[in-house]
Amino acid sequence: MKFSQEFKEAVLHLSEKEKDKLLIRLLKKDENLVNRLYFELIDDQTVDDHRLKLEKRVTERAKEITDYAKSLNHLKMLTRNLSGEISEHVRVTKDKFGEVSLNLLMLNTLLKNSKLLFKKTTPLQAKKFNLYVVTRTYRILLHIHKMHEDLYMEFEEGLNELGNLIGDNAILMSTAMQNGLDVNWLIQNDIPEDIEQYHKDLKTQGFLK
């Protein structure tokens, strides 16, 4: 929402008491803003502290939902909440590094523990979950590409593991190839310079859907 200059000036000229009342009223309606301000103003834990805590949560929860899932489609549905926790962490802490590392950890843990689910499913039944993995993988690559090159090495082990997990799964590898994902980018930690345009072109052509 855009505000006119006149409106901005009118708000700035409110009394401190009126501003305080408005702020509290707005905070009651915006949980994300409350969490963000709490982290910035009161929380004595750092971004790294929160990330480490969530790493443990992601590992444990990803294993739990994989064991509980009745099918790959069911697993995809169960993954929404865990993915949401990662997104909430990023919104609150602005942890761009964690956005990559936590999603890598989630995908790798899900794939390592879902081999039995893949064995009892058909390529058609696995399609939605496979597409979810491929789409998430592209998102990870896009986020890394926006970072400083010095950070690329931090993700080398996780990317290599993900690339091999995809490559060792014939059904998943087929979906990756159909949507232009080269697992060598992951295994060799060699993200194409034009990955953003490449990804955009794929979506324009109707892939990743």
Image (tube, rainbow, N blue to C red):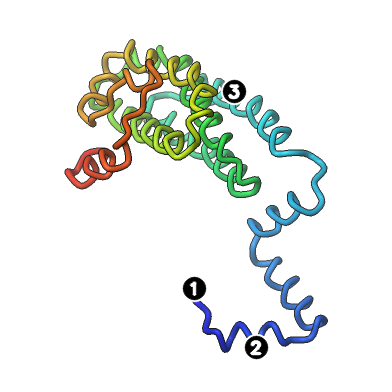
Residue occupying the point 22% across, 24% down: 177
Residue occupying the point 25% across, 38% down: 198
Residue occupying the point 70% across, 66% down: 27
Q: Secondary structure at mark 2?
A: helix
Q: Earlier in the sequence, mark 3 or mark 2?
A: 2
- Amino acid tagged 2: Ala
Q: Earlier in the sequence, mark 1 or mark 3?
A: 1
Residue 201, given in percent of the width and then of the height, sits at 22, 43
Q: Secondary structure at mark 1?
A: loop
Q: Earlier in the sequence, mark 1 or mark 2?
A: 1
Q: Does 2 sit above or below residue 70?
A: below
Q: From the viewer's perspective, is 148 left or right of 20?
A: left
Residue 72, given in percent of the width and then of the height, sits at 38, 26
Quadrant of residue 9 in the image?
A: bottom right
Residue occupying the point 81% across, 81% down: 16
Q: Secondary structure at mark 3?
A: helix
Q: CA distance from mark 3 to mark 2?
A: 50 Å
Depth order, front residue of 94/154: 154
Q: CA distance from mark 1 to mark 3?
A: 38 Å
- Graded by Cα atoms within 10 Å as few (under 14), some (14 to 19) or many (20 or more), the crowding at tag 3 reads some
Residue 88, given in percent of the width and then of the height, sits at 59, 45
Q: Label 2: which residue?
A: 10
Q: Label 3: which residue?
A: 59
Q: Label 1: which residue?
A: 1
Tell whether label 3 touches label 1 (CB within 8 Å): no
